[in-house]
Amino acid sequence: MPKTAATQVKEQPKPAVEAMADLSLEGVAEISAALRPLLADVFALYLKTKNFHWHIAGRHFRDYHLLLDEHAEQIFAMTDDIAERARKIGATTIHSISDISKHQRLKDNNEESVSAEKMLSEVRADNRELTRFLRATHEICEKYNDVATASLVETWIDQTERRTWFLSEVLQNH
């Protein structure tokens, strides 16, 4: 039995990205393209911060250990919000560790032994870089009037600047 025109229209595949929010498809594509590496960077920074938390040593061990744990918790809390925001606007997000490594811009640290000062300096630098990435993402959100994502990004900027400030203050004594 031949298919009618109405049946043929119903069977056509949906677009790869369907805007669920009041955003253009172009906006969804550009915002999600910014959120994907942002999420990868946040995961990378989380793992680096936990790595340093686990391996820090020295006379300020307890203070640094607790500080890095607090920072790691805050960073990890961002991951779900970033991924869910991408999904809310109709996009997909990262799927695996290999996907994270493909999109991350922050560098890993796989050194066996790192001094406490180098650890703190490195996560401070990474937090500064993350702030730059967040600001760039905010600009994209403003371009498409995505106030919900922009609002989240503003909170993350404030948190990231606070972590940078704390690390800078600690490093003044070194």
Image (cartoon, helix red, strand yellow):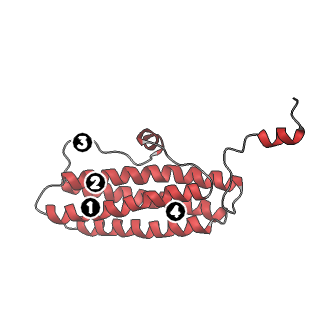
- Identify the mark at residue 121; answer none if there is no mark: none
Closer to the camera: disc 2 or disc 4? 2
Residue 55 falls left or right of residue 103: left
Q: Are marks 2 and 4 in contact (CB under 8 Å)?
A: no
Residue 154 relative to residue 51: left or right: right
**Marks 4/3: CA–CA distance:** 30 Å
Q: Which residue is at a point 45% across and 49% down the rendered structure image?
A: 40
Write down the residue under mark 1: 69
Q: Secondary structure at mark 4?
A: helix
Marking on residue 135: 4
| Residue 67 percent across, percent down from the top left | 25, 65
Left or right: residue 61 compared with residue 166: left
Look at mark 2 in the image and give the residue it sits on: 50
Asked whether the residues under the numbered discs 1 and 2 touch, taking CB atoms below 8 Å apart as contact, a structural biologist would say yes
Relative to 105, is 172 above or below?
below
Q: Amino acid at mark 1?
A: Asp
Residue that appears at 18% across and 66% down: 63
Kind of residue at badge 2? Lys
Identify the residue under disc 3: 111
Q: Residues within 10 Å of mark 3 (few under 14, many from 20)?
A: few
Residue nearer the viewer, 4 or 58: 4
Work out how far the residue at label 1 is from the one at label 2, CA to CA, in angstroms: 7 Å
First in sequence: mark 2 or mark 4? 2
Instruction: Look at discs 2 and 3 and give the one toward the viewer.
Output: 2
Helix, strand, or loop for circle 1?
Answer: helix
